[in-house]
Image: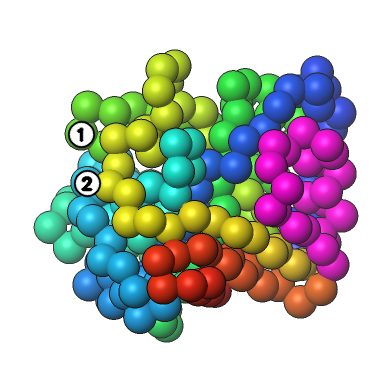
Amino acid sequence: MNSKKIVTTSAASTPLFFDHIAIGAKSLGEGAAYVRECLEVEMPPGGQHPRMGTHNLLMSLGPASFLEVIAIDPSASNPTEPRWYNLDSFRGPPRILTWIVGTRSIQQEVAALDGLAGNVAEVSRGSLTWKISVPPDGSLPLDGAFPTLLQWPSGDHVAARMSDCGCRLQSLQVTHPNAGKITRWLGNRLEGECIKVADGPFKIRAEFKTTHGIKTLT
């Protein structure tokens, strides 16, 4: 378990925003098949991340949130650093890796977490560049229960440019034995009422309202 403490700074008063859910897979084909089976939708293509050697599928969940399937890009050069989302060690069937929270002050947030979130990296997909928290070894903080932090450039949210397949997040349930670390950091800053964090064995479960009814991803 990560023993890093959370340091209180001025970031504690800044708002946080649910941004997206990342599903990991050994290939985008496997990830697309998993989403197709669970949600009965076809995930549209996203793009490549040259720094990390990965690529993705993307689907809007509304004006400011989305669903992502991410995998190692077999056509990309190997990165000079560990890949994000612990993808270098990914094994097994597709699954939710973690959830991602947006902030307008990622440097302050990461500093306040005293190493728990990792470092701030600048990454890109096509012409889009953003900042995201990535531990030096590419691991997922608290197994993925602790969210990755992200700061988009100013302007319209990137989800507004993604395909909308009619899915909307109804609830995101995150459990972990050290859930207190997450809830203390979040405080009352996270906008939206569909995110629930609680003590328990590690698990991330997301429910979506779709044109075929309520569907679930884990």
**In this view of the protein, can residue 29 be seen by the observer?**
yes
Q: Residue at x 84, y 39 (%)?
A: 187
Label 2 CA crowd tier, 10 Å (few <14, some 14–19, many 20+): some
Using the image as rendered, state which of residue 131 and residue 21 is in the foreground: 21
Task: Work out whether 57 lies above or below 122.
Answer: below
Residue 113 magenta: no
Label 1 CA crowd tier, 10 Å (few <14, some 14–19, many 20+): few
Task: Work out whether 81 lies above or below 206.
Answer: above
Q: Residue at x 24, y 42 (%)?
A: 50
Q: Residue 212 vs residue 47: left or right?
A: right
Task: Work out whether 24 lies above or below 184.
Answer: below
First in sequence: mark 1 or mark 2?
2
Using the image as rendered, state which of residue 218 and residue 24 is in the foreground: 218
Q: Residue 8 vs residue 84: left or right?
A: right
Q: Residue at x 76, y 67 (%)?
A: 176
Q: Position of residue 202 (x, y in %)?
A: 71, 72
The quarter of the displayed image where residue 109 is located: top right
Using the image as rendered, state which of residue 46 and residue 44 is in the foreground: 44
The quarter of the displayed image where residue 26 is located: bottom left
Is the Cβ of the residue at disc 1 closer than 8 Å to that at disc 2? Answer: yes
Identify the element where label 1 is drawn.
loop
Q: Which residue is mark 1?
A: 126
Task: Point out the stretch of residues depicted in magenta.
Answer: 178-199
Marks 1 and 2 sit apart, C-alpha to C-alpha, by 7 Å
Q: Position of residue 103 (x, y in %)?
A: 60, 29
Q: Any mark on residue 206, and which?
A: none
Identify the element where label 2 is drawn.
strand
Which residue type carries mark 2? Answer: Gly
Q: Which residue is mark 2?
A: 47
Quarter of the image that includes the N terminus? bottom right
Q: Residue 128 vs residue 114: left or right?
A: left
